[in-house]
C-alpha cells in the first residue's frame, strides 16, 4: 500500500531524510517513532503530498508522489496535532465544507456528516461552534473530518499532543475503532507504550533512516524502551 | 521484518471521491470565509474601522474647493481602499496558516487554482463592502457624489486587479515571520500600475472630462486584470508548493 525507496529530503544542504526505505502493508497500523528532529514530520509531509522529496520514490496505493499527487490526496485522511478546523464554523459546517472539497454530493454528504459525528461521539454537538469545543473534542472532530470521505490511508501526526488522560483514552478507543475499518494507518508518536498497544507494526526513525521496522507483537512492551534507546542512541527513555 | 506492500487496484481507487469541480471548490471556500467572518468579524471590523477613521482624517485635513475635491477625493478613496484591503489580505491567509488549515486545504484533491480564486473572491467581497461604505461616507463628507456608472466600473476593475495581486503575494508572504510588513513592501510596487490607472481614470470621470480622454485607462485595467488573473492561476500552485 505504501512503498518508499531511497527517500531523500534535504533543506538546502541539510539532509533530513537520508535514503529511507519503508513498506507499509495494506490494512496495517504502523506506529512511527523517533526523537525530535529524526524526520518524522518531514516524512509525513512527503507522504501527504505537502512536500516534495529531493530524491527517491514514494508509492501510495500504486500512485507515485509527487507526480500523481492529486490521485494520492483523494485516498488520504490526515489528523495532525493541530485540528485543522475552523473555530467560527460549527462541527457540521466544518465537515460539510471539507465534504464539498472532497466532491461528496449533498445527499451523500448529509448522511456521512451525521454518521461520522455520531461515531466520534459529537452527534449532539453538531450545531455548536468549534471554538466552544475542548481540545479532546476538537481532535475527535478532526478524526471525523479525516474519515468523512472514506480514505484508504490515514495519517496521524502526533494526535495526542495536548490531550489530557481522559481525552487520550477516548482517542485510543476511537483509533482502535477506526483501525477496524481496514484503513492503512501511519501514526507518529512519542508515547512508546501507547504506540505499541495500538499498532500492528512499529518503525523507529533515527537520523533520517528507518533504524527498526517490525511487528509490534514481536516486541515485548517492557523491552521497547531499550530497543528505542539502542536504535536512536537516546540515553534513557521512559 | 519489512513487509511487501499490496497496491490499491485502479478499480478500488476509482471509488474514491475525485475532488469537487473547480467552481464548486471556489464557491465553497468563498462561502466558508464569508460565514466564518460573519460570526467572528475579525477582518471586516478592522477594515471598516480603519476606513472610517482614514476618511474622517482626510476630510478634516483637506479643506478643498469644488474643483480640488473632484481631483482629490478619488485619490482618498483609492488610498483608503488599498490600505484597508491590505489589512484584510494580511489576515485572510494568515488565519488559515496559523490554525494549520492551509495544509488542510492543500491536502484536498482539488485544483490549486480553485483555492486561489476562492480566497481571492472572499478578499474581493470584503474590499467591496469597505468600498461601498467608503463611497457613501465620501459622498456625505465631501459633498461630491461618487455614484456614477463609469466610476463604479473603474472601481470594480481596480479592486479585482488589486485583490488578485494581493492574494497571490499574501500566499507567498504567509510563511514569512515578518509577513505583516513584507506584504505591503511587495504589494504596493507591484500593484502601482493598477492603482495609478484606477486613480487617473476615476479623477477624469469625476471631473467630467470627455470619455475619449480617459477610456484608455479602464481598458488598460481590464487587460491588466485578465493578465494578472491568468498569471496568478498559473503561479499559485508553485507558490504554495513547499
Image (cartoon, helix red, strand yellow):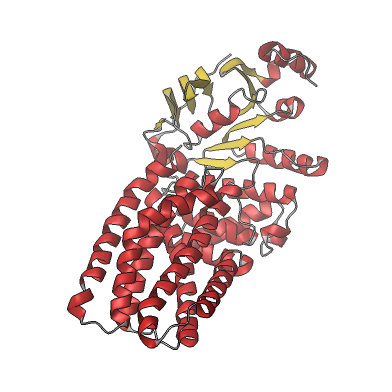
| Percent x, y of residue A82 | 64, 44
Asked whether, in this view, residue A132 is left or right of residue B204, the answer is right
From the viewer's perspective, is residue A109 above or below residue A203? below
Is the N terminus of chain B in the top left, top right, bottom left or bottom right quadrant?
A: top right
Asked whether the viewer can see residue B128, the reply is yes
B215 or A85: which is nearer to us? B215
Dividing the picture into quarters, in which one does residue A184 lie?
A: top right
Taking A172 as reference, is B202 above or below it?
Answer: below
Looking at the image, residue B146 lies above or below residue A178: below
Q: Is residue A120 visible?
A: no
> In the depicted view, which residue is nearer to us: A91 or B62?
B62
Residue at the (50%, 66%) spot, across then down: B84
Q: Is B95 placed above or below B149 here?
A: above
- Residue B238 % position (x, y): 38, 41
In the rendering, at what x and y percent does residue B217 appear? 25, 69
Number of marks drawn: 0
Q: Residue at x 57, y 41 (%)?
A: A78
Q: Position of residue B11 (x, y in %)?
A: 39, 39
Foreground residue among A23 and B141: B141
Amino acid at each position: 500500500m505504501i512503498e518508499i525507496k531511497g527517500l531523500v529530503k534535504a533543506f538546502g544542504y541539510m539532509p533530513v531524510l537520508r535514503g529511507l526505505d519503508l513498506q507499509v502493508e495494506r490494512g496495517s497500523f504502523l506506529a512511527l517513532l523517533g526523537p525530535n528532529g529524526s524526520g518524522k514530520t518531514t516524512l509525513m509531509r512527503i507522504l501527504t503530498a505537502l512536500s516534495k522529496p529531493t530524491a527517491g520514490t514514494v508509492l501510495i496505493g500504486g500512485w507515485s508522489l509527487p507526480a500523481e499527487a492529486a490521485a494520492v490526496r483523494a485516498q488520504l485522511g490526515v489528523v495532525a496535532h493541530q485540528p485543522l478546523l475552523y473555530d467560527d464554523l460549527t462541527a457540521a459546517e466544518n465537515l460539510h465544507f471539507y465534504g464539498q472539497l472532497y466532491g461528496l454530493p449533498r445527499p451523500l454528504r448529509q448522511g456521512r456528516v451525521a454518521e461520522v459525528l455520531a461515531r466520534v461521539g459529537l452527534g449532539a454537538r453538531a450545531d455548536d461552534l468549534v471554538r466552544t469545543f475542548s481540545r479532546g473534542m476538537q481532535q475527535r472532530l478532526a478524526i471525523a473530518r479525516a474519515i468523512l470521505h472514506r480514505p484508504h490511508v490515514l495519517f496521524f501526526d502526533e494526535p495526542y499532543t495536548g490531550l489530557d488522560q481522559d481525552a487520550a483514552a477516548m482517542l485510543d478507543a476511537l483509533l482502535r475503532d477506526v483501525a477496524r475499518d481496514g484503513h492503512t494507518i501511519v501514526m507518529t508518536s512519542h508515547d512508546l507504550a501507547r504506540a505499541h498497544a495500538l499498532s500492528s507494526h512499529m518503525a523507529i526513525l533515527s537520523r533520517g533512516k528507518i533504524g527498526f521496522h517490525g511487528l509490534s507483537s514481536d516486541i515485548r512492551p517492557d523491552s521497547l524502551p531499550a530497543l528505542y534507546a539502542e536504535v536512536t542512541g537516546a540515553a534513557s527513555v521512559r | 521484518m519489512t513487509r511487501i506492500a499490496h497496491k490499491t487496484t485502479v478499480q478500488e481507487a476509482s471509488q474514491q471521491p475525485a475532488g469537487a469541480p473547480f467552481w464548486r471548490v471556489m464557491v465553497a471556500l468563498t462561502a466558508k470565509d464569508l460565514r466564518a467572518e460573519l460570526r467572528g468579524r475579525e477582518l471586516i471590523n478592522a477594515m471598516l474601522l480603519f476606513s472610517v477613521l482614514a476618511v474622517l482624517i482626510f476630510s478634516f485635513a483637506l479643506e478643498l474647493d469644488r474643483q480640488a475635491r473632484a481631483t482629490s477625493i478619488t485619490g482618498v478613496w483609492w488610498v483608503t481602499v488599498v490600505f484597508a484591503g491590505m489589512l484584510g489580505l494580511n489576515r485572510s491567509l494568515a488565519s488559515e496558516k496559523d490554525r494549520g488549515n492551509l495544509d488542510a486545504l492543500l491536502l484536498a484533491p482539488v485544483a490549486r487554482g480553485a483555492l486561489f480564486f476562492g480566497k481571492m473572491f472572499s478578499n474581493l467581497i470584503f474590499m467591496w463592502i469597505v468600498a461601498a461604505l467608503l463611497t457613501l461616507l465620501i459622498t456625505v463628507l465631501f459633498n461630491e457624489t461618487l455614484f456614477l456608472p463609469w466610476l463604479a466600473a473603474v472601481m470594480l476593475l481596480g479592486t479585482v486587479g488589486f485583490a488578485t495581486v494581493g492574494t497571490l503575494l499574501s500566499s507567498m508572504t504567509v510563511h514569512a515571520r515578518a509577513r505583516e510588513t513584507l506584504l505591503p513592501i511587495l504589494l504596493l510596487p507591484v500593484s502601482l500600475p493598477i492603482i495609478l490607472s484606477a486613480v487617473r481614470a476615476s479623477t477624469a470621470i469625476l471631473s467630467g472630462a470627455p470619455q475619449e480622454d480617459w477610456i484608455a485607462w479602464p481598458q488598460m485595467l481590464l487587460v491588466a486584470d485578465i493578465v494578472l488573473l491568468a498569471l496568478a492561476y498559473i503561479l499559485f500552485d508553485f507558490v504554495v508548493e513547499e
